Image: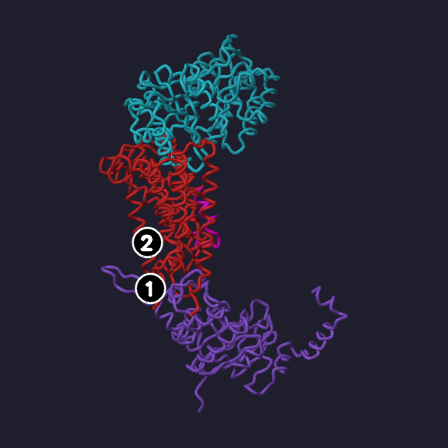
Amino acid sequence: MEKPPILEMRDVCKSFGLIDVLHNISLRVHSGEVLCLLGDNGAGKSTLIKTLAGVFNPTSGTVLMDGTPVTFSSPRDASNRGISTVHQFGGTFPLMSIGRSFFVGVEPTRKWGPFTIYDRKKANEIAVNAVQEFGITRIDDGDRLIGGLSGGERQSLAIARAVYFGARVLILDEPTAALGVKEAAHVLRIVLQARQKGIAVIFITHNVVHALTVGDHFAVLIRGAKAADFRKGEKTREEITDLMAGGEHMAELEAEIQHLKAPNASATVTTH
Amino acid sequence: MSSSSSSLSISGLLRRPEAGAFLGLLGVLIFFVIFGSMEFLKPSGAASWLNVAASLGIIALPIGLLMIAGELDISIGAMIPAGSMTVAILSGHYGLPIWVGILGALSFGVIIGLINGYLVIRTAVPSLIVTLGTLFAVQGIVLGLSVIITGTTSVALTAAPWAKFIFGQFVGGTFQVIIFWWLAITAVYIFVVHFTRYGNWIFAMGGDKISARNAGIPTEKLTITLFVLSSTSAAFVGMCQAILFNSAQVSAGMTFIFNSIISVVVGGVLLTGGFGSIVGIFFGTLTFAVVNQGIYFTTFDRNWSSLIIGIMLLLAVLMNNTFRRMALSYAPKKK
Amino acid sequence: MSNLIQGLSRLALSLTLAFSASSVLAANIAVVGGKTDDAFWNKIKKGIDDARLIVEANGGKVNYLQLQSYDNLGPDAAQLVRTAMSQKVQGIVVPNWVPEAEDEAIKAAVAAGIKVIMINAGTIEKANELGAINYVGSDEYLAGKAGGEYFAAKGQKNVLCVNTVPGAANLEARCKGVIEGITGKGGKGKQLPLPATSFGDPTAVAEAIKATLVGDKTIDGLITISAGDADSAAIGIGQANASETVKLGTFDFNEANLDRIKNGKQLFAIDQQPYLQSLLGVLMLNAYIDFGNKLPTAPVLTGPGIVDASNIDATLAGVKKGAR
């Protein structure tokens, strides 16, 4: 018998008052697997993440961990159970040092005479080691401020932090959206490293190329419903793009764009 | 690791939040030595700004922490006269032992702090507005009760010698004893804020309150504690003033609201929270006091003092911004 | 609330009196004033209460119409003047706080044949313009001038007037008077304006005074514009080691000021004597209505009253009785 998925959603619906945001979503993710959640803006991705991270409870349907139904009482409850969310901009404390923000709420301490004090050296060392393990060797000073790191470095640090604190499921919310090509590649490499460590990764994105680079399993959300669910190699990039656009043929759109780009129509393009 | 070596280097020091504040202080000291006289640095001259800095500093420190945590407390403007009137009415008007008056003043501070903190966490109203409300409310209570009880708005107080010795003497004939309170309190704040986990929590709260709460930080307890600290500190300063000046007035202290916020900002604390340091606030307070009192050692026409104060404080804040940018953009050299 | 009830019952009482007793030749006088939960207006009330004894002895009545708040000072005071008119009083004693708002009501009262005396706020020019009989009160400039001359009389040569609220017209007038008073007697005087950042911080005021005294050893007299500032100045003078040479005076006074005058650590305080303002205002009006007496002195200045070692004991007794 197959090992139960580490995290599973069964027929999850979520509505706010009269507005239905999620309809009958079923998803499963195993350890050591990357599930890519694709969807255009407004497709319900963030509500889905928040439901998995314990911010919301589903209106109906169940969330299961290791095959057992669970109800998260708070985001903290979810994170205690090993579900960790990393947001688009990585660390949320831009003016704190790497070491301090790494350990917010769980600061390492040591004895200093009769006092218990924050162990800055230890915090910095652990934080720097954790992120260097993922191959980001440019971070070597735990006193640097988070705000001084590049977007990719922040994402990497946040992922390293989640892994260090024992995350079993890593939810990455658009980690590459605001990054340059090279930075994004770094983050994708780290996603694969986390996968190698046996962590289940839920990777939210609308960049199909990034999804195809790391994903094992794909789900496309359209207007709150799951429009497709397929495994690696089952669909091409064009097919996925069309799906995300809600069934419209992207090829046709692209052709139109090409047409508008023609010299005689350049004025229309520049006035947008 | 290279972390220890880089924090000792000069560039490392320049990246600290207090760097701008320290250079600002040096700048204004040099300015007044050049345009004033060396008198300014001799004991009696130094006392003239240290005395002012001390009572302001005791209030600016908790205000700074509140600002780092993303809150503000302007009710301190009313808590200073509340503290001085409480001790003057209890021990001056009613003639109760001075310790009763001291305890009364501090308890009043704790109560108002609890009310402020509780209202801020229980309502979604910004702390500026909540404490604006308590500012007026406390003013009203103090004025109303003073007039009902004593028939006047100013009460005389002759404190017992021991209380005068601890809270209101001139050490060496010129230095108000409150300077030593200020130094001791600063040391305690430095320890708690920069060397224990609680300090980290305050910074995290100011950076992002929701993330901080999700990380398990007791943000509500911390918020209440900070409000209790600020209003009790203000009551403490008011009480010391009454003991030193042998008199308390209903209408004092409003100027401390702006002066403490200015000191904190000159000290490198970000108005939007999440960044700053105790040492920075300490230097910021000193800078403010030097600028405020320095003009009396110069030959400038006194009518210009407000202008000079304004310009020098603006320069100090601008300097701070430069240093904060430096800290944020800092990255070690590529290997 | 109790004030309101008191006020209403008095109003009702005086209304009945107005209708029943106005035909008798005895003065029915209304006094407009501030709330008596304020120390200053308590002294005014004491003056009214003492004057009432004489008015009542001659068959008249005195009614104190007090403001319920200071939020809308001018219009509220004008309304109280009209209330008094509707009570058919013969005389009104009123401060002219906000001429723009009150002048019209006062003119209307005069036009209706009601005799008016202005107290506390106003000038004799204004009283003449509106047809009021007299102005009883103080003049900030003259009070300052008396202070300057008092310093000169005590042998002081160089007086500093510490102004913690530079720019406020009444306080500038106080300092201007002091400076002109001392220079008129051959001495020197100047103002020390303190920045707004020092107002309400006694240490900052004390240290500013200390630094100024250390910087100029010829200063031998110092006057502050409020009683609280005098407490700060006393410390500042002590810190400058100038207690022997620099004499301290102040406008207004509080308990700590009087203690210092009593102990010889402060030279004097200048008082506008609110008790006299209402006492004289009511009595002069009563004498005018009843007997046609009129003082040729105009204005009648109740200030400056100087409190110094010579009258400190009587002043302290007055404080106990609520007259000072």
Image point (44%, 30%), residue name: C193
Q: Say whether disc 1 or disc 2 marks the residue closer to the N-terminus.
A: 1
Q: Nearer the viewer, residue B243 or A112?
A: A112
- The chain letter of the red chain reads B
Q: Nearer the viewer, residue B129 or C112?
A: B129
- The chain letter of the purple chain reads A
* Residue A59 visible in the displayed image: no
**Left or right: B150 in relation to C15:** left
Q: Nearer the viewer, residue C112 or A105?
A: A105
Q: Nearer the viewer, residue A145 or C39?
A: A145
Q: Which residue is mark 1?
A: B4
Q: Is residue C125 above or below residue B142?
A: above
Picture coordinates of residue B60 (x, y %)? 38, 46
Give the residues drawn in magenta, as a range: B119-135
Image point (59%, 19%), residue name: C109
* Residue A218 visible in the displayed image: yes
Quarter holding the C terminus of chain B is bottom left
Outermost residue to the right: A264
- The chain letter of the cyan chain reads C
Name the chief secondary structure element in magenta: helix
Residue type at mark 1: give it.
Ser
Q: Is residue B117 above or below residue B292?
A: below
